Image (cartoon, rainbow, N blue to C red):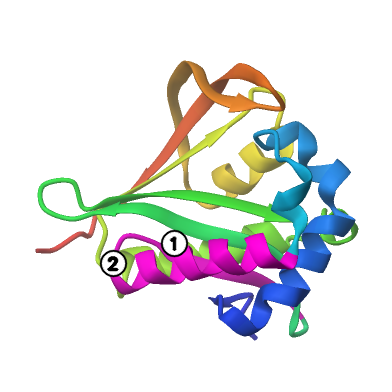
Amino acid sequence: METIRLVTMDDAEELTALLVRNRRFLAPWEPLHDDDHFTLAVQRALLESALTDHGNGRRLPLVILDGGRIVGRLSLSGITRGGLQSAAVGYWVAADSNGRGLATRALAEAVELAFGELNLHRLQAETLPENAASQRVLERNGFTRFGVAPEYLRIAGKWRDHHLFHRINRDWQP
């Protein structure tokens, strides 16, 4: 059974409810969001934008599933072709689904898709230094840490350093 699939507009209500339930859980790892971010209207607009980017080949917006139920998101974004052939990966799993290997399985499927069908050469991910769980997910999927980006993203209202991870597709063929 697959753990990921392409997001659809039909997922908007379920994703909005999931975000609302996990707002406090995700807050330490996310940029600050105003209350509007957690409304169905804003989530529909964000999904529409993600699907437009997907249609343009710039993003692959996915949902993480557990028995057919949406429990998180995973996205390959900033897909760049030409000399780079790369994308950034980001993900989260709901609090009540953490610790069960879902993020690890979802990322494994996303890597297979990225290095297979999308024929990318490199994936990159960033984590806060204290996000050991996410770092374990990356390491279990063959990502290696290669540096630190000072004040990389504004998370929970503060500019935060991030550990940089990457995985190279050594079998890449043009």
Residue 105 is inside the magenta segment? no
Count of numbered circles on the image: 2
Residue 50 among magenta residues: yes
At 59% across and 49% down in the image, what residue appears? 140
Q: Can residue 118 be seen from the camera position used here?
A: yes
Number of the label disc, if any, that sits on residue 111: 1
Residue 4 appears left or right of 39: left
Q: Position of residue 32 (x, y in %)?
A: 70, 33
Rate crowding at label 1 as few (under 14), some (14 to 19) or many (20 or more) other CA atoms within 10 Å.
many
Q: Is residue 71 visible?
A: no
Q: Which residue is mark 2?
A: 57
Q: Residue at x 55, y 61 (%)?
A: 46
Nearer mark to the viewer, of 2 and 1 = 2
Quadrant occupied by the C terminus: bottom left
Relative to 159, is 128 above or below?
below
Height in image: 60 above or below 142? below
Depth check, front residue: 8 or 84: 8
Start-end of magenta stretch: 40-66
| Quarter of the figure that contains the N terminus | bottom right
Q: CA distance from mark 2 to mark 1?
A: 16 Å
Which residue in the rendered view is the most extreme toward the top?
150
Q: Residue at x 62, y 37 (%)?
A: 135
Residue type at numbered disc 2: Gly
